[in-house]
Every structure is written in structure tokens, then in C-alpha cells.
Image (spheres, coloured by chain):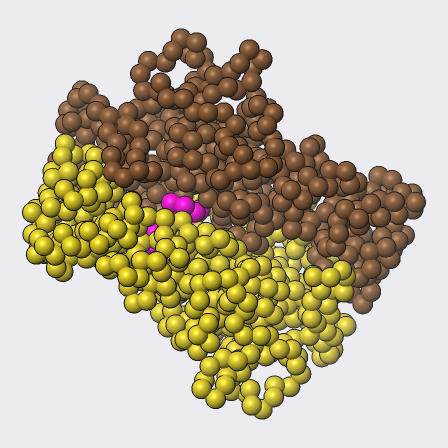
Chain colours: A brown, B yellow
Amino acid sequence: MNAVDLGLPVDVPSTALFTDQYELTMLRAALRGGTADRRSVFEVFTRRLPEGRRYGVVAGTGRVLDAVENFRFDQGVLEWLREREIADPETLDWLAGYRFRGDVWGYPEGEVYFPGSPVLRVEGSFAECVLLETVVLSILNHDSAIAAAASRMSSAAGGRRLIEMGARRTHELAAVASARAAYVGGFDSTSDLAAGFRYHIPTVGTSAHAFTLLHDTERDAFRAQVDSLGRGTTLLVDTYDVAEAVRAAVEIAGPELGAVRIDSGDLLLVAHRVRQQLDELGARDTRIVVTSDLDEYAIASLAAAPVDAYGVGTQLVTGSGHPTCSMVYKLVARAGSADQDAPLVPVAKKSMGAKSSRGGRKWAARRLDAYGVAEAEVVGTGPVPEELADRGLLVQLVKNGEVVGREPLEAARDRHIAARAALPMSALQLSRGEPVIPTEYV
Amino acid sequence: MNAVDLGLPVDVPSTALFTDQYELTMLRAALRGGTADRRSVFEVFTRRLPEGRRYGVVAGTGRVLDAVENFRFDQGVLEWLREREIADPETLDWLAGYRFRGDVWGYPEGEVYFPGSPVLRVEGSFAECVLLETVVLSILNHDSAIAAAASRMSSAAGGRRLIEMGARRTHELAAVASARAAYVGGFDSTSDLAAGFRYHIPTVGTSAHAFTLLHDTERDAFRAQVDSLGRGTTLLVDTYDVAEAVRAAVEIAGPELGAVRIDSGDLLLVAHRVRQQLDELGARDTRIVVTSDLDEYAIASLAAAPVDAYGVGTQLVTGSGHPTCSMVYKLVARAGSADQDAPLVPVAKKSMGAKSSRGGRKWAARRLDAYGVAEAEVVGTGPVPEELADRGLLVQLVKNGEVVGREPLEAARDRHIAARAALPMSALQLSRGEPVIPTEYV
């Protein structure tokens, strides 16, 4: 395969290459040293939330399941690893037969998380688990960062509709994952066709300034758009003079005009003026969509403005200041021999300060108060206390290599809304704060 | 095609879906209205650099060429567009035969840019050009943001080696593009196997803390790694006690030990201590690699430390505070009719404030002073002044739909180093500043 000639950004034969080289060299050394088959438990967690954030949102779980299922080394990849001397013959043989055959447990997608929450647990031989580190983290760190921003925006928007339109501001495939994560976080639709195609998310979009500029007059452009897309379309009214454009829009489409879009200027002021003008022209049902560099704060500041929908781009796909999470994938327990019955021994890095971790295979549960409001994230390695028995957070996602945790994206979206609603009210404050509930280790 | 069942993150049939819906609805309205064939010029530029940055770096151009070449609508996509009623029959017919047949000019990859620089110019019919907006911007905005961060890091690192290792902190395919952009910006290698496979970038990596923890003792782990990977390998020495680990490492591998890696603690202090210890143990050629949450400032602060290589993750793939650029794709000129000889008319959005743009098809040149140092970015729409005739920045990348501007990645990397070296010295200051040369419109 001549990668340079093919050139498609989608030209990656399997998820197995979304891997840092050290995973293969560790595998090689473990195979040689006889430790590769030791039963092992890896956990994904974060030591802290992004600064000032009050909760995190698990997103990407469904994509992790896809990635694990498709993680395999085909002939072209094996040949390349051989040529580059990344893998020796023994390792190549082992990789040729690779399929993940272990178990994965995790927080279901859309659930909220806190520092120390074991959002994913991967169990199997050291060899089969160590290979998944990079792809698992890539997906969870990216998607959860976007979903967290989306959740803040959707809570700021109240019931108003939110359109994801950030594709142009991020990598073309990160855009697809971002639209998906935004949907989990409470967005209603996306401008990104690939996301609509791939994940069945509703897509929207009508026209840009270029369309107006293509025509000899703004009226020509509006007429062409209404002729083609119908009166229910959204006309972009800020290419020249907004008031003049609104007048022309209603004249051409009539009061049945679906919506107008404002993409520049003082949105608060302009939205009020446009609403008044639309009402005066009898277009009382024509909606107003605003779309200019919005983030959760701008959305909140427009709460009193007559806005019907927000289109959000840059700040959504860049996680509104936090484009990644700091989730890590750590070995927390392993057997002392390759014997499948050998007991698991908790392990943890013990070196300097902030990067230490807690050993042992963990469970997690969310303790609620008498009113059903979350009170603490409880994480433990011993037996689960009886009062938390039915509040466990981890569900099985993969069993003996078989994906058992797939679900429709709607389920994750609904779960997120419910999980967020069960947090203390202060979770929804946009200001900088601490995690809204503490993590207790028992 | 059942997208839910397939599930691969690479499951996107062509680059044509990396498109915002409004591009298709504009096409539909333009086809209906008879304006689709008007000759048009779109330009990509940015109104400002990320705050505090002194120059930008063009990256992703090669990927744009791949995307344009592969932009086509296959049967499955057309069927989906029909079902979702995004395109009407006339539009679907038109899309079925789509191949970009126009011209693309642009700054060659690796070149630096400033506010207003026309980094890409796309010319053809309105219909064929308008469809490329999103994919072009996704690629350039993402890749240029990463390359700009990489460039600052590589200038801070002086001649020391830089390893890109951020895959786990960004979307799995954004990671591949990031490794590529980092290489353009001056990095030497990547941990990401997909980037090595796809773009032939050198890959590196040896082991993580998990490998040490897998073994009963750190010495067991070191021995297994050296047995398998040889004495030239890099041993990770901060799982437990660093001094003890360094002693064990040299004992096991001998003074031929390739390198030790430090991933936590006060890197300045620890690097000095480790260097002294290695020297005392006779391992004078053993290198020191550091890898803990580095950015360009941390790299600069380690200039006096005995460090041989830096591994950079999070801050690189998130653009060191600026994960995206603000490049836009704007119609700047178009004909007044579908007649191929009709003259081009400059067009520009005239609405409120900051979002106005300059009409007209532009050239750009970099004026140098008597010493060959860049003095101004000159952008114009009229004839090129004679003294700038051989300083033009735009090169032809696509001619009548044929890609003519492909080049090896090394060429872009070399070009960046040369372009950066021709900027005023203050360009390399890491502190916040203004664009290091002004943009002059003539």
C-alpha cells in the first residue's frame, strides 16, 4: 500500500495503529521475559477535573467499543512493523492473532465523573490490555472534553436549541466525534454531514455570506434560497444592513419565513431589534438563530434576549478552554505469575508527588442524600458497603472479548441529562469551582 | 452500509462528507437560481493571530491536496443525502459527477503567515469551490495550530531532540495529523505508530510505568527490557526511587545504556542529579529524556539542564493554549454571470465591525530588508510592484483539478526552518507579543 499516493485522511486500515510505540516494545519485552500472560487490571481515571470545572462527562465509550472490536493487525501493518524493527518475529506472530479477549467495565456513556472515578476498567492478560492504552485514552480524553463543554452550554441554554457547527475549527474526524459528544452533552443537531451519516445525528444548515455575495443583490440571493429551499428556510441577514435584510426577507418569504440568522455584531442588541422588526412585519413565528463565537457564558448572557437557537463552533470543539481531559490508563493490579488462578496483587507508582496512583481493582458508587441528590463519589477496592450495593456506577461493556455494552446514542444523551439533574444545584454554576461532590476512598 | 454496525472510526467513505450542510443547500439554491457556474475566487486567511503569538505556521497543505483529490460523492452518500432530503434530484445529479476542476494556489506548507495572508486561494465555479470550505478549514485550522506550537517548542529546544507523544490527549486521527504538523514545525519523531505508517515520520518509544509494575521488582523489569531491546534502550527510572533505579539501570545495561527517561518531579533538579550519577557510574554517553507536562516555557527553562531530548504531549496536541486557528474561507470575487469570460467583481461582507473582509483576488509577497530579514507581509489586488516580483508567496497547488503541488514532508519541514530564520529575531521570543512584521495592503 502506497500511503503517500492514497492520501485519504481515512486511510488507516485498523484501530491497531492508534498506538504509541512503547506499547509494542513493552509487549515484546514481556513476551520475551515470560510476564506477558500475567492477569492484569488497568483503570482509566483522572487525578483532577480541568481547573474550575465542577463535574466531568464520560463520552466516547461507544467509540471505545468500536475501537476495541476493530483492533487487529493485518498483513500490511505487520510487514511495516517488521521492516521498521519495532516488533521481532515472536511479537509479530503474537500480534497476527490478536483479538482482545478480556473484559471491560466502565461508567456508561453520558454519566458524570469526578477525580478518581474509575471511568473504565480493562482486564485480561498484560499483553492484551497494554496495547489498548493509547486508543482508549485518545477517544475518552477527546470526547469527554467536548461533552463537558457541551453540557455546560446546554445547561446555559435552558430549553433553547443548540446546533453544533465547529467542524471547520478542528480536525475533520475530530469534528465527527465532537458532534457525537456534543449530542451526548445535550446539543440537538450538527452542521457536520459526516456526523449525520455516521451517527444519525440530525443535521442542519442553510447558507453563508458567500451565497449572498454571489448574487448581484441580497434580494436575489434570498429569492433564490426561498425558491429552492422553501419559506421555512433560515435566511442570513447580516451581510450588509440587518434591518434592510430583515425587511427584504419577510417581503420575499412572507411571514412564514422559518428563521433569520445573525452572525455578527452585538447579539443581544441586534436580536431585540430584529425580533421587534419581525413582529412588526407580522412574522411572529419566524425564529432567530445566533451564531457568532458563542460559548457558555455568551449563551447565558443571551438568556433574556429573544433568541430561539444558538449555533456554537470554536468554543465547543475546543472544549471551551479545556480541549482535553487528563485521563490516564494505569496498571492497578496484576498476578504474580502467568497462572490464571494466581491472585491479583495491587500495584501503584510510588514516585514523586502528584503522579502517584492508588493500586487495586476498584468499584465506584454514587451516594445520594435523602432527596436523591448526589453527595459523594465513593471508590473502593474492598467489598461494596450494603447501602451502596444498588448505586454502583460500572457496567460491563465487553465480556470475554465480546462487546455487550453497545447502546443507541440517545440512551447516553438521556443518561447525561438525568445524571446532571441529580447533582447538587451548584453543579450548574458556570463560574469556576471545585468538583461538586467529593471523592471518598473506602 | 450500516454505519452503526461497522463502527470503525475510520469508516468514512470519502472526504466529501467533511462538509457543513449549508454548503449543499447553497449549491442547491445556486443550481436552481442559475448562479452556480459563476466563476468565483475564495480565499483562506485569518483576521488575527492567536493572542500574543508573533507568527503563524501554515501546515496541512499536503492534507488539503489529498482531501480535494478524494472529494467525491459515492452512491451510498448520494442515497443518504436523498433520504435526508438535503439534496434535491438536480443537486444529486450534479454531485454524482463532482470532481474539483479548478485551481488552488497557496502558501507552501511550512511557510509562516500573518493576519491577512491569503494562505490558500481556491478558484473555479461557485458550485465547485463552495463545497470545499469545511474540509479545507478543518485541516488548515487544526494542523496550523499544532505546527505553530511545535515551532515555538522547537525554537525553545535549541538543537535538542523533540519527540511528539500527545496521541493519548487528542482524537485518534487528529493525533496522526498532529504528529505530521509537529514534524513540519521542527519535531524529530513521534510515538504514534499511525503517523509513522502514514507519513513515514520516525517513531520512538520503549516502556511505561506499567511495565515496571508488571514485574516483581524494578530490576526484573529492566532486565527483561534490556534482554529484549538491547543495551541501547531507554529505561524509565521514576517508578519508585530515581537514584536506586539509575544505579540498577547501569548495573544491568552497563555504561552502554542508551538513555533514561524521567517523567515526574522537578525535572531541572532531577536531571542534574541523574546526570551526575550517570557520569559517576561511567555512563557518560547515556542520554536523559524528560517527559512530564512540557510546553515551550518548560522546555526553555530546562535549557541549562543536562537534558538530551524532550517528549511533549498534551501541550503540543492542544496547540499550547491555542488549539485552533481562526482561518476563514471567504468569497472575495466572482463573475456577474455564468459566462466564462465575464470579468471578476470583488465582493466583501460589509456588515458590523470585526467581521468585514477585503474583496478581490489577492497576491502576497514578503518584503525583506537589506540584510534579508522579513520586514512586511505585503498583500494586494492590483499588479505586483516590481521590487516584490520575485518575493511572491503563493504557489500553484492544483491546476485544472490536477494536483501539482505535492511534495515530501521533509520539504515543508526544511522550508519552515528557513522561513522562521528569516524573521526578525524577536519572532522567537516566547513572551506574548504582536505579529513580528506588519501586513501592508497595497
Residue B184 coordinates in the image, percent (x, y) = 40, 65
Residue A211 visible within the image: no
**Magenta span contains residue B81:** no
**What number of labels is visible?**
0
Q: Quadrant of the C terminus of chain A?
A: top left
The magenta stretch is B163-173
Q: Quadrant of the N terminus of chain A?
A: bottom left
Q: Quick check: A338 above or below B231?
A: above
Q: Quick check: A296 above or below B126?
A: above
Q: Is residue A227 left or right of residue A437?
A: right
Residue A357 coordinates in the image, percent (x, y) = 31, 32
The residue sitting at 53% across, 80% down in the picture is: B375
**Magenta span contains residue B166:** yes
The residue sitting at 43% across, 25% down in the picture is: A439
Q: Quick check: B222 above or below B440?
A: above
Residue A275 visible within the image: yes
Residue B368 coordinates in the image, percent (x, y) = 50, 84
Q: Is residue B47 left or right of residue B152?
A: right
Location of residue B419 by image quarter: bottom left
Say which of A166 and A149 sits in front.
A149
